[in-house]
């Protein structure tokens, strides 16, 4: 059982380049999330999808877009990468959307923007 | 601004001792709290969650929640070097925007 799978694991971009981070879960969860993790800071929510067909902004959405492709897949796109977007990105899923539903995380994508 | 605060550490304890990790939160409307363990370079993994005041035990781990004082703690009994990791506290807050607020984490080092 793979759980939450993210690709790629590592990526280096130049300022202004674009890329899409892919995420898929096989747990039949309804809700999916994208977080970023920076040193000395907690995980911060970028975007989330409470259910298939819906997406909403999180705490730090600027510079990102998302697509909930189907129930399994939730992608994160950086249209024009900036050095401030250098971070570790985690995709997560939960059975339902809400504070009482534990998150299951993917293995993360380490992104460096030069 | 809803916040979850943790001491960044490192908290250093000898093998076999009890490690006590603490977390405070700012919103009295909080509903639930989660403790995640994160090894260096890895993703967070859920250890425990607690919704009600009091203690909740699972093996060597005990979560404690005190809503009146707005703190939650994680006790690790018989600490092992394999427990060395960063422990993230996350709080679920009520009202409008259902999501978890994460603390920055406490780094635990268990030395032989």
Image: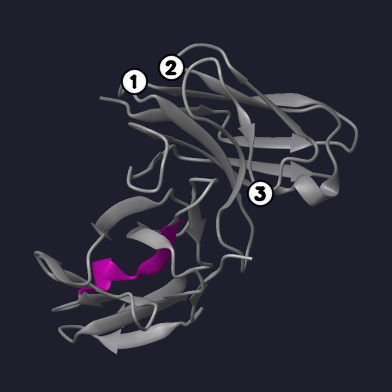
Q: Say which label, 3 or 1, has the lower sequence index.
A: 1
Q: Is residue B30 above or below residue A10?
A: below
Please check whether the numbered discs 3 and 2 fall on a single chain. Answer: yes
Between the residue at mark 1 and the residue at mark 2, the CA separation in whole angstroms equals: 6 Å
Q: Are marks 3 and 2 in contact (CB under 8 Å)?
A: no
Give the x, y percent position of residue B23.
41, 76
The residue drawn where x is 20% and y is 74% is B80
Name the residue at the left extreme. B59
**Residue placed under numbered mark 1 in the picture:** A26
Residue A37 lies, with reference to residue B105, above or below; the image says: above
- Residue B52, picture quadrant: bottom left
The residue that appears at 48% across and 45% down in the rendered structure is B98
CB atoms of marks 1 and 2 within 8 Å: yes
Secondary element under disc 3, as helix, strand or loop, is loop
| Residues in magenta, as a range | B80-92
Please give the residue where the numbered disc 3 appears in the rendered image: A59
């Amino acid at each position: 059982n793979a759980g939450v799978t993210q690709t790629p694991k590592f990526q280096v971009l130049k300022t202004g380049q674009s890329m899409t981070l892919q995420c898929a879960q096989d747990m039949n969860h309804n809700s999916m999330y994208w977080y970023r993790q920076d040193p000395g800071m907690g995980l911060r929510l970028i975007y989330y999808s409470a259910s298939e067909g819906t997406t909403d902004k999180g705490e730090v959405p600027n510079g990102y877009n998302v697509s909930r492709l189907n129930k399994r897949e939730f992608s994160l796109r950086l249209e024009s990468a900036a050095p401030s977007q250098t971070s570790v990105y985690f995709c997560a899923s939960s059975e339902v959307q809400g504070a009482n539903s534990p998150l299951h995380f993917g293995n993360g994508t380490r992104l460096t923007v030069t | 601004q809803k916040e979850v605060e943790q001491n960044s550490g490192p908290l250093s304890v000898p093998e076999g001792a009890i490690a006590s990790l603490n977390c405070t939160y700012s919103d009295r409307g909080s509903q639930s709290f989660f403790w995640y363990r994160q090894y260096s370079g890895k993703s967070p993994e859920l250890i425990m969650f607690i919704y009600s005041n009091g203690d909740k035990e699972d093996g060597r781990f005990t979560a404690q929640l005190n809503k009146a004082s707005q703190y939650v703690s994680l006790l690790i009994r018989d600490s092992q070097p394999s427990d060395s990791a960063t422990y993230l506290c996350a709080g679920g807050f009520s009202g409008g925007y259902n999501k978890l607020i994460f603390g920055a984490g406490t780094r635990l080092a268990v030395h032989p």
